[in-house]
Every structure is written in structure tokens, then in C-alpha cells.
Image (spheres, coloured by chain):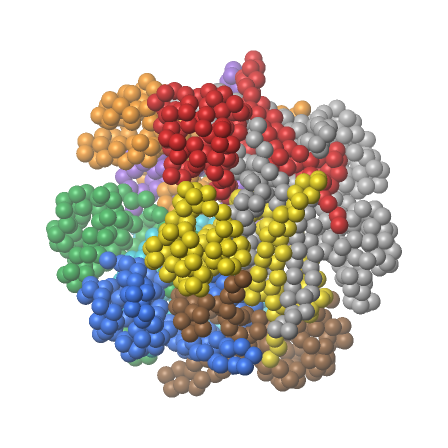
Chain colours: A orange, B purple, C green, D cyan, E blue, F brown, G yellow, I red
Amino acid sequence: MTKADVTVMIRAKKREGKVSWAAIAEAAGLSEVFVTSACLGMNSLSPEAAGKVADFLGLPSEAAIVLSEYPTKDFSRTVPTDPCIYRWYEITGVFGEAFKELVQEKFGDGIMSAIDFDMEINKIVHEKGDRVQVVMSGKFLPYKSW
Amino acid sequence: MTKADVTVMIRAKKREGKVSWAAIAEAAGLSEVFVTSACLGMNSLSPEAAGKVADFLGLPSEAAIVLSEYPTKDFSRTVPTDPCIYRWYEITGVFGEAFKELVQEKFGDGIMSAIDFDMEINKIVHEKGDRVQVVMSGKFLPYKSW
Amino acid sequence: MTKADVTVMIRAKKREGKVSWAAIAEAAGLSEVFVTSACLGMNSLSPEAAGKVADFLGLPSEAAIVLSEYPTKDFSRTVPTDPCIYRWYEITGVFGEAFKELVQEKFGDGIMSAIDFDMEINKIVHEKGDRVQVVMSGKFLPYKSW
Amino acid sequence: MTKADVTVMIRAKKREGKVSWAAIAEAAGLSEVFVTSACLGMNSLSPEAAGKVADFLGLPSEAAIVLSEYPTKDFSRTVPTDPCIYRWYEITGVFGEAFKELVQEKFGDGIMSAIDFDMEINKIVHEKGDRVQVVMSGKFLPYKSW
Amino acid sequence: MTKADVTVMIRAKKREGKVSWAAIAEAAGLSEVFVTSACLGMNSLSPEAAGKVADFLGLPSEAAIVLSEYPTKDFSRTVPTDPCIYRWYEITGVFGEAFKELVQEKFGDGIMSAIDFDMEINKIVHEKGDRVQVVMSGKFLPYKSW
Amino acid sequence: MTKADVTVMIRAKKREGKVSWAAIAEAAGLSEVFVTSACLGMNSLSPEAAGKVADFLGLPSEAAIVLSEYPTKDFSRTVPTDPCIYRWYEITGVFGEAFKELVQEKFGDGIMSAIDFDMEINKIVHEKGDRVQVVMSGKFLPYKSW
Amino acid sequence: MTKADVTVMIRAKKREGKVSWAAIAEAAGLSEVFVTSACLGMNSLSPEAAGKVADFLGLPSEAAIVLSEYPTKDFSRTVPTDPCIYRWYEITGVFGEAFKELVQEKFGDGIMSAIDFDMEINKIVHEKGDRVQVVMSGKFLPYKSW
Amino acid sequence: MTKADVTVMIRAKKREGKVSWAAIAEAAGLSEVFVTSACLGMNSLSPEAAGKVADFLGLPSEAAIVLSEYPTKDFSRTVPTDPCIYRWYEITGVFGEAFKELVQEKFGDGIMSAIDFDMEINKIVHEKGDRVQVVMSGKFLPYKSW
Amino acid sequence: MTKADVTVMIRAKKREGKVSWAAIAEAAGLSEVFVTSACLGMNSLSPEAAGKVADFLGLPSEAAIVLSEYPTKDFSRTVPTDPCIYRWYEITGVFGEAFKELVQEKFGDGIMSAIDFDMEINKIVHEKGDRVQVVMSGKFLPYKSW
Amino acid sequence: MTKADVTVMIRAKKREGKVSWAAIAEAAGLSEVFVTSACLGMNSLSPEAAGKVADFLGLPSEAAIVLSEYPTKDFSRTVPTDPCIYRWYEITGVFGEAFKELVQEKFGDGIMSAIDFDMEINKIVHEKGDRVQVVMSGKFLPYKSW
């Protein structure tokens, strides 16, 4: 049983039971973004959280083990094609250098970690059209000299 | 005179005068991220804002015209190599599908616009190490059927 | 059952029953282009429209659910090879910059949306050879400054 | 003097004189899309039309010769990055197969020519936001068997 | 049953019966190049010709239907690796610009159609070594201005 | 002085003097395709033929030396973008396997040489539209076993 | 049964019987390099040689037919990754231009054929470490002018 | 002064003085392949050999220093396009696996070094056409286990 | 049974029995890095070591044979996407040239072998956060001139 | 003045004065690897260290400013071609997964930082041939869940 197999199981359970990612995340006791990414095979859950997800969805116990295994993060499209994901790639291209300039101005030479990192996605109701809000935060890692 | 020429001028002025992006943004009356990206040639300023930037930095008047021209957004690296920008690309790969799932769950079938879009970058002081916070918001655009 | 499975079923039904895309679109109560793209897995139908398509073609009820699920738009060929599709890619290359110049001249800095978008394909009978006419329209999205 | 040199000259004249593409096209006696693409080096004008453009903009006579030379259509970005052009590439990916299906259904096995081809771009005023309308037409070319 | 399935069947029949492409083409009443490419899934035969091929080779009747369906021309190798096909790619690279210059000199601005197109392959017996002769002809398509 | 420099000179002479490739080829005493490709830097002329071309066009004597130097055949576009050249690339993709099958059927296992090779391009006047005819011939090279 | 199937069979026979490539080549009556490449699906054996290989290894008679069919040479890695093969790719990159210069100096404008070609691989015992010796020879093919 | 500058100088001297690579190699007291590759910037000569080459060709003394500097081996074409070099790339693809099998059979698990390596290129006169002979030898490097 | 099959078996045994790589390496009597890479199919074990690994894990005897077969090192991602592996790729990009400069300064023109090579990975406990230490050593191979 | 300009200056000073990287590093008071990489434009020195390097080598004062500016780490070759750097890329491919397994086994799910990172390169004298030793250490960064 692989992480891809477990993702297929979870999607089937969601379709049958009309279960939302929000409900799965609540069952796990963690955030929506993190739990969703773990269910899609891109992160690992602790054995406890994995067990809660498996229980909540009625998955076999091996699925809980698989959910807690360390994943290989494999993103197969160099340039994503789905428009929802491509727009983020485009933002990386258009604002990447500005992001780098401002991180350096505010913090010095270094980067925002993608490992010690969190993200949430919110719905902002707006009269001219609702907005997707993304709040990311990552630890600043300064370049070391030695 | 091209946008690339103006970026070189602005960098020279910054080096000479120790001017920050924050100060240039304040002079323009707009946000740091947007003004920085416009100074790097990835967005256009209104003639008024462009004039303020040119005045503040002591650039020739043609530079103000160039800053207000519509840019061609050309990002030459399919996969960015600078670590500060690559991490964002990695986030797109690792969390792109989770982002898509949650946008769809919260809003329906559609995307977050990268055009009707804004972003800010904040420094969060933290005892275990400061954090870079990015807050992005884009209008939700539902797929149309017809 | 995946969207690809449903596409295979629909093609089989079409071959058996000599059903046209036009007839399927009429059954769905939507346009030919949109319904065809949904049957090929690139767009989602509303549950009502999906049900009508499934009924019309005699597909199992799960197929209707699958047709209404949100798709991941995955186009696997960076440069399309089929001549019918390549010509459109070529038009993007040859006329892309002219398109951008004219959109900007007529509307200001911004883009034509590919999400709030519609298209129709018509046959124009012509004595020197019939012509394929494509009429696309997308909402103009102006770049925001902030 | 190359086509790229002439494009630089034309852009300089436009900036100085606030001349629109529409006005250049009118001077040439041809459509906006075609004349703009020729001025960008992607098509050739007849000597007469080239002369009219050169006269209208005050370009040297060699520029008229260059505008009438046959171009090499060279689009350097396999996947375009500018959002305005990328959206068209995305439309090719998302709707390419549906386009092919409908052309075949309406005309038989064959393609829409990108050579015996025309296009216009219109502004459709709309209360929920103006729309960019593109109308393309190309001769249907049936596959020959022999 | 797909075009790939039918190609496998045809190859099996050829191996068993030592049937040549020339014989299949003769049965179809069409040229060798066209019939071979159709049997390899790159072109469609008319229902009549497809029926003749299926009868001649003893294929099931569904195969005839499949042979007459419109193909998606999908060539998976951007740069072909088989030496026999690569040499043609090399000729495209080495002589492509010369071909373009001479087509333009003889016909004006335009292209040789790859759709209204035919080709034959002949064996020229020669004392210093036999030669492969390829004769291709395609309709000249002039660029249209509008 | 490089082959690229000589090509620029030849194009300038052609523009000034309205000299055709056919006339240059006649001066060289060789075929149009070969002489054009040599003038574009993709083949070498014998010193005699190079001298005739230089004399005919009034090029400096060093140009004749350069025309007779052995070229490095460098085709920079993996997939050509100019439509006139792309169509040939498409023919390679669509008919490459059929070509291989028929060469093997007629000659055995081997290839058509792209070195011991010649090509001519003819204009076939036709009432439904003139046709570009390409006649290529290359020595058959059988695979050797040892 | 495909060439890939036969390669799997041959590898199984080799593992079972500890049969060397040298022994298979001797059975075929041909060289090691050629027979090994044919067993790996990259060349065809004559029916006689194929029969000898099949007999020697105890393969079914269809395998002999498959070994004598003309292969499609398909090398799937643009840049090989196995170190043993990569080093040869590296030699092509590092010494390719020197090779070309010396072939031209010794023979004139032309190439070494990869079709009328042979190769052997020898072990040279050497006190400072044994050496792999590769001896390749290919017919010189001069460029033709016409 | 870079290695590329020195290569240009050497080519100019060769053109003027009709000096062969063989003569330069003899002046250096080293082999043709190695000296040619060093003159093309892909290897370094010892200061003594570099001095001899510079003296022989009448190059400035800085050129000798540059010839003895350690090069960065940069081969810009992933797939070479010049036919003379491509054929070698093709041999790597077609015979790479057979080469690996035979090296392993004769020597064990390991590779042929491309560093402790030599090569010569010979002309074999042959009545059916002269042959290019390449003799390469590289130290066998066994994989280490630890 | 392939190396990939054996890797799957080993992973299953590890999951069941909570066996560490360290324990497998100890059973084999070799280092952790080497044994892990061999179990992942990237290196070969001696028959003795392979037998010990198979015994320790309770694998079938054929698995031991497969573990001792010479592998084809095939790394399918040109740019690795897993963050843990990507960081190493990034180090290659950022420090590759400095590494080359220092190897040359300390040893002369040449390279560090990746074949006569070993590596260990250590955990360095550190109060500000533990550190991963990698110690690699490879034989220096000087470029040969000849 | 750019970082690339400063690198050219430093290389010229090194050639003139036979200055080693070791000596420059000693002048800077930092390690060889870090200082070399900063001089090659891939890292930034503190203003103090940059001043010491500039003084030691006799560079203009602007060079010191440039050496202390934050770099954009741009590695232009997706797959490096220089053998000395390629071998490291190969190690990443061959041992990347083993490295990941062992880091996870020793530390848990996470990565070795390439930012909080150091490296040294040593010469190990060895009777069977000297060895290049690389010692790298990077902070372990555990994946965060939230």
C-alpha cells in the first residue's frame, strides 16, 4: 500500500460521505492545509494524527501507517498546467525577485524556510467578489559565513 | 531607454544613497511589494506614482514614462535557481494540489486571480527565530459554463 | 471511475450510436465547446447538466457524479503535436504579442481572462473553401496596484 | 537594418507622438491585428502598405523595404510567460482537444489553417466588466488521401 | 479497440503472412505511404478503403471502423532517435532555411502545406549504391493579409 | 570574418541588386538548394564555386575563403517555429515511421543518407493552386553486421 | 512478443546458465559488440544468426524471428545517467569538436558513418590498472555537392 | 584574454599559414587529438607544451599562459546538431548499453575513465571507401564498496 | 525479479520488523550509505554481502542474486524535487565552481572520482540544533595528456 | 560594476600575482570554500571581510562594496557539463535517495539545510593516490506540522 493508494481511498470516502477536508483536518486536530497535503501524500502525519484520520474515515489500519511514513515529495510537472496551480507559479515568476529584495531588506541575506513553514487559506467575503487569502509564514534562515 | 535600464538606475541610486525599497514605496504612496516589482520591471506604475518615484530618486523624466509603460512579464528561468525564490517554487510544488483542493472546497470550481491580486511581506519577530510572513489575496474567479 | 474512464465510455457510446457532440450539448442545455470539453475531462458540468448527459447517453449514474467533479486540467504536451491543435499554438506564438498590444491599447494594462471565458466554433460556408470561425470572449481583468 | 530595428523605431515614434496601433492600421489600410503583427516583425506588408506606414510615422525609406520583407517567425518562449499571452496558451491546452473534436464533427478530418487566416480583437462593453472578444477565421483544410 | 491495437494486429498479420505494405496499399487502392501511415495510426482511411484493408488482412470488422476514425497525431519524441528518422530531422535542420528561401523566391511569402500533401518513396537502382528517392508535394499556401 | 558575416553580406547584395538565389546558383554552376544552403552557412562550396559566387556578387576575396571552409551545422531550435520550416518537422513526425517501414521493405535494414544526398525544389503549376514539389534522394546505407 | 520480451528471456537464460555475451557471440558467429547490441534490441541479426542464438540459449523459435526483425532504435535518455554510459557522452562533449576537426583535416568535409560501422571492446592488462580499449571504425562519407 | 580568444587566434593563424593540426601537435610534442582539444579550449597544456605551440604559431606570450590554464569544459548543446558530432552521440545511444554489458563482463562492475583517457583518430585506406578509425582507451575504474 | 522488486521487499520487511538501515548495514558488514544505496538498487553487493542481507531480512535466495547484479544507475529527475535531495543539487549549483577551483589549486587539473568513492553521514548533536554531517572522499584523478 | 566584473578582476590579480585562494581566504579571515564562492559571486562577504579581500588584492573600493552585496545565485546549467562538477551531480543522483533515507532514520522527517551550512575540502595524501575529502555540515531542519 502506497501513499497514492491511500489518497485514492480518501477521495472515495469523501465522494461517498460528502466529507470535507475541513472535517478531516478537525478530526486530525491539525490545520486544513497541512492535513490536506498529508492526505495527498506530500507530508507525513504523526502516528496519532494518522490514526485519527483513519478512524474518522474508516480506513484500514495499514493506511494509518502509510500516512505517517515520510514522503518523497515528487512534483512531476516542471511548469504546472492546472490554472489554479499555474497562477501560483506565475506569482513566483512575477514577484519572486521583489520578494527576495524585500526579505533581504527586512532581514539581511537569507531565505524564508519552506520546511519550518505554515500556511492557511481563508475566504474573504467581499462585495466586489470574494477573495482567496493565503497567509504563509516561514522561519528566516540567514546565510552563514564560515 | 528600457525598463531594464531604469532598474539599473534605481539600483545605482539605492547603492549611493542607501535608500530602501520601503522609502521608495512610501514616496510612491503604494505598497512595498507592488512598487518594488514595478521598479524591477514587472509591473507598471500610474504616471503620478512613476513621477513621484523619479522625483524622489532624482531620475530623468524619461524614466518616469518608462516606469508607467505596460511591461512584458518575462521570467527567464523555468525553474528558479536562487534559493530564496526556489523555496517559493517548491511550495508551489508541495502544496499546489492542497491549495487547489481547499480553494475548491471553500469557493467552488475556480481559481485565485494573479491579476486582481495583492501581497504584503512582514517581519514577525519570534524568539525561536524571526519569521517571514507573506499575505496574498486574489479575487476568486469561478469557472463559467455557457 | 475517473474522468478518463468516462471519456472512454462517451466515445464508445458515440461510436455505437453515431451521436454527435452537438446532440450531447443540446441534451445538456449548454454550448458545444463547453460540453465537449467537459466530456473530455477539462471542465465540470453542474449536477443537473451531468445528469442530462448521462441519461441521454445511457451512462451509469456514477458517471454523472464524475462529470460534475472539479477537474485537474492537465495538458501533457508542452508543444502540441496534432496539427489541428498545433496551429492554435502557432497562432499564439505568431500573434501573441500583437494581441497583447491591442488588448492594452483598447483596455489598459491587463489580460483577457481564460476563466470567465466562452468560445464558439462555427462553420462559415465560403465558395473558395469553407472556413472555421472561432469566437472567444473573456472578461478583461485590469492589473491592480496597491 | 532588421525587422527588430524597425520595431524599435516604431515604438519610439508611438511613444513620442502618442500614435495608436489603430491609427497605424488605418494608415496602412489594413486591419489592426495584421498591421500590428507586421510592425512587430511577424508578418510582411505589401510594398504599398509598408510605404504608407513609413510615411505616416516618418520612418526612413529603408524601413519600408524591411517591413515588406518576408519574416522568419521566431517565437523564443516555448511556454510564454507574460500572463496576457500565457492565457491564450492555456486556452490551447484546455480547449485544444474540444476544438479538434468539433472541427472534425463539423467539417471532417482536417485543420483550421493558420496561414489563410484572419483575426480581429474587439472591446465588448459589459456592465459586469468589459470583455475582450477575439474572432478568428481560418480556411478549413481537409486531409488529403492519395 | 484503439488505433494502436489495430497496428499491433496488422503487424502480427504481416509477420504471419509475409504481407508487404505494398500489397496492403494495393488492396486499399491507395498509395504506399498514405496507407502505411494510416495503418500506423497517423491518418484515417475512408470507410471503403478501411474495409478493403480489413478484408485483405482478415481483421475483425471493428478494426475497419477504427482505421477510419480521425487520428490524433502524437509524435512522442521531440528529437527522433531512430537513425532512419533522425536523418530526416537533420535534413530539416540543415536545409530548412534554404527550403524557406527558395519557396519564398519561387512563390512569395507562404508555406508548403503538410495537409494538402502527398509523398512517394522510390528505389533508384544505382551502380554506386541504390538511392532512396522521396518525392513530396504540398499545396503552396500564401500568407493572407487583411 | 565568419560564415554568419558572409550571409549578412549576401543578403545585403541581394536586397540591393534584386539578385535571386537562382542566379547565384547559376553563377556557381551548382543547384539552387545546395548553393543557398552554402550561402546560409550550412554547407561548404569548393574554392572554385566559392570564387564564382564572390565574383558574381562583388564580395571581398576573404568571403570566398570563408564560403569554402567546412561549416559547423548548428540548428538552434529543437522544434522549429517558423511555419514554413515547422511543416517539414511535422511531416517528419507524422510520416517518419511510415518512411522507415517502406525504406526497410524496399531496401532492407538501413537508412537514407543525409550526407550523400541531394534535393531540388520545384514549382508545379496547378489549377487548384500551385504546389511545392520537393525531390530528395539519398544513398541507401545498409546496417552492417560484424 | 517484442524485442524487449526477448531481451528479458536472454537475461534470464544468462543468469540461470552463467552464459557470457562472448559465448553467445561465438554461437552467432559474429562479434561481441554487435551480438550484444542485437540481443538488447538495438540491431537485427540475420535469420541464420538469430536461429543460432535461439538454439544456443534454448529460446522459442518466435524469439529467433523477433531477433531478426528490424529494430526501432529508441534511446530514452537524452543525457544518459548511468556513469558507464555517461562517460561516453562526456567524451562526445569534450572531444567532439576535436574529432570533427581531425576528420576534416584527414579526409575533407564529411562524417564517420554510424551505419557502415563496427566496434570492438578489448581489455588491455596494465600494471597501473587495466584499461578498456574501444576500437571503432566507420566509413568516411564525404558531403556531396550537386 | 580567454581560451575562446586563443582559439580564434589559432584558427586565424591556421587559415593564413595553412598550418595543420598535425603540425601543431608535432610542435607540441603531443598527440593530435589532445593538442587539438586543448587548442579548442577543452584541455590544458603544460606550460612547456603551451609555449611550444605559441612559438610555433607566433602567438603572444599571454596565449601560452591561457593555453596552460585549467579549462571549464562547457558543451552547450545537450544533443549535438553537427552531423559529424551527432553520429558519435547516436553511437552512445545505440551501443551504450552493449558497451556497459561488455565492460562489466570483462572487468566487473565499473566504468571506463574519461579522465585517465587517450584517443587517436586514424585514416584507414580502403578500396570500398576510406574508413575513420577511432581508438580510445581509458583506465578501468571498479566501483568501490565500503 | 528486478532490483526494484527487491527494494519493495526490503521496505516491506523494514515496515513489519522495524528494522533500521543501520542494522542491515551491520548485517552486511559494510557502511550504512553503501548498503542503503545497494538496497535501493543503485549499487551491487558482493555475493557474500548480498547473502547476509537476504538472510538477515528473510528474503528469498533469488533476491540475493539480484542484489549482487550490476545495476544500471538511472536517476529519472533531471532536477530532483524532494527537498531533502534538492538541497544537495542546490549545493552543487552554488558551490560547484568553488569546489572545482579548490580541487585544482590543491591537486592540479583533474577531478574527484565518483567511482573510487566513499561517503558517511553522521549526526552531530548541537545545542542550537543538531547538524547533518556528510563526509565524502574520492580519489583524485588527474587529467592525462598524451 | 557587477559581481561578474569583480570575479574577472580577481582572476586577473591571481594570474599576475600567483595568489592562491587559500591566501585570499586567509586575508579575509574565513574559510577557503566560503571565500572562494563569494569571490565567484555566489555568496556575500561582510563589509569587513570584503574590505580585507579588496586590500589584499589591490582592488578598487567599489569592488569591496560589490563583494558585500547580496547575490542572486544563478546556476545556468541544469545538468553541469564540466566533469569536476558533473561528478557531484552524479553523486546527487546515485546517492540522493540513500542520503534521504539515512537522514530520516537518524533525525526524523526533515532535511539538511543548504543555508545554515558549511563545507571544507581537504587533500588526503594516500599511497594509492591522493584523495579529495569533502566535509559538509548543515543544520537539520525538521518538517513542521501545524
Q: Which quarter of the rendering shows the N terminus of chain E?
A: bottom left
Where residue D139 appears, as percent x and y from the top left, is: 35, 72
Displayed quadrant of residue I139:
top right
Which residue appears at 69% of the width and 73% of the height?
Answer: F67
Q: Which quarter of the rendering shows the C terminus of chain E?
A: bottom left
Q: Nearer the viewer, residue I79 or G115?
A: G115
Q: Is residue I86 visible?
A: no
Where residue D15 appears, as percent x and y from the top left, is: 57, 58
Q: How many marks?
A: 0
Where residue A82 appears, as percent x and y from the top left, is: 37, 45
Q: Is residue F106 visible?
A: yes
Q: Nearer the viewer, residue A95 or D35?
A: A95
Q: Nearer the viewer, residue E107 or I23?
A: I23
Q: Is G26 placed above or below E122 here?
A: above
Horizontal side of residue G50 vs C122, given as left or right: right
Where residue F99 appears, as percent x and y from the top left, is: 42, 69
Horizontal side of residue E130 vs F46, given as left or right: left
Q: Is E36 placed above or below G98 here?
A: below
Which residue appears at 61% of the width and 26% of the height?
Answer: I135
Which residue appears at 62% of the width and 77% of the height?
Answer: G145
Which residue appears at 27% of the width and 39% of the height?
Answer: B108
Q: Nearer the viewer, residue B51 or F137?
A: F137
